[in-house]
Image: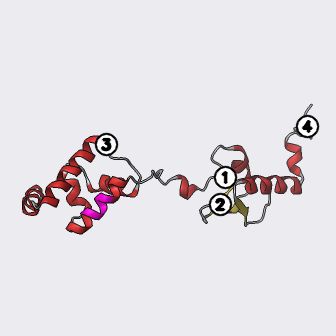
């Protein structure tokens, strides 16, 4: 009965210009440009994101029909960035002025250096307890207990 007939929805995509225009409008609304040639809905096209300046491949079908279709796959995998607090900015200045590494600060508050890096880059926020511990060590070192803290770091290694 349905031999040689097509769905009215998908028959629209038989027209090359209709699919091409639809993809271009969608990309334009998401701050992207189509670099590659549009063949049909199943062949990947090269897309340039004006927001992050990355180039990536995506099929028009996935682009139009999936929630994250127009998002850059490179940026989507990066963790979210928070606003870096003034305290962490002070901590970075303090750490560099005293010659400490992120690992040294991590050893002082009993956490890994990757977590300190995440705090300083804005990927994670420190808890109130961690902020209090860092403040205590900052105050102790500012007063002049450099040798005591250095010994504590060396003992842990």
Residue at the image position 38 percent from the left and 49 percent from the top: 124
Q: Quick one: label 4 or label 1, which is nearer the N terminus?
A: 4
Residue 17: image location, x then y, percent = 88, 57
Identify the secondary structure beneath mark 3: loop
Circle nearer the viewer, 3 or 2: 3
Which is more N-terminal, label 3 or label 4?
4
Give residue 127's mark. 3
Q: Do the residues labelled 3 and 2 touch (CB within 8 Å)?
A: no
Which residue is painted at 79% across and 54% down in the image?
25
Of the numbered discs 2 and 4, the one sitting upstream in the chain is 4
Chosen colour scheme: secondary structure
Which mark identifies residue 3? Answer: 4
Rendering coords of residue 37 (x, y %) = 77, 65
Q: Mark 2 points at which residue?
A: 57
Residues at marks 1 and 3, CA–CA distance in whole angstroms: 35 Å
In the rendered image, residue 41 lying in the magenta stretch gets the answer no
Q: In this view, does 27 lie to the left or right of 126?
A: right
C-beta proximity under 8 Å, tags 2 and 4 = no
Quadrant placement of the N terminus: top right
Q: Kindly state the secondary structure of the residue where label 1 is placed.
A: loop
Report the residue that reaches farthest toward the front: 143
Residue 106 x/y as whole percent? 23, 54
Residue 69, percent from left and from top: 66, 49
Badge 4 marks a residue whose secondary structure is loop
For label 4, the crowd category at 10 Å Cα-Cα, with few meaning under 14, some 14 to 19 and many 20 or more, is few
Q: What stretch is highlighted in magenta?
A: 90-94
Tell me the CA gap for discs 4 and 3.
65 Å
Lower position in the chain sequence, tag 1 or tag 3? 1
Q: Name the residue under label 1.
A: 70
Q: Is residue 27 above or below residue 3?
A: below
């Amino acid at each position: 009965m349905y031999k040689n007939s097509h769905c009215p929805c998908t028959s629209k995509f038989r027209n090359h210009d209709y699919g091409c225009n639809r993809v271009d409008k969608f990309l334009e609304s998401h701050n992207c440009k189509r670099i590659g040639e549009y063949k049909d809905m199943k062949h990947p096209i090269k897309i340039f994101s004006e927001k992050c300046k990355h180039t990536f491949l995506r099929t028009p079908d996935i682009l139009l029909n999936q929630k994250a279709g127009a998002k850059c796959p490179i940026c989507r995998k990066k963790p979210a960035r928070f606003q870096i607090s003034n305290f962490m900015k002070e901590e970075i200045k303090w750490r560099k002025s005293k010659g400490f590494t992120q690992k040294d600060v991590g050893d002082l508050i009993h956490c890994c250096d990757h977590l300190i890096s995440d705090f300083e880059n804005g990927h994670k926020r420190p808890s109130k307890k961690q902020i209090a511990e860092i403040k205590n060590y900052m105050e102790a070192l500012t007063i002049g207990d450099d040798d005591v803290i250095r010994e504590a770091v060396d003992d842990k290694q």
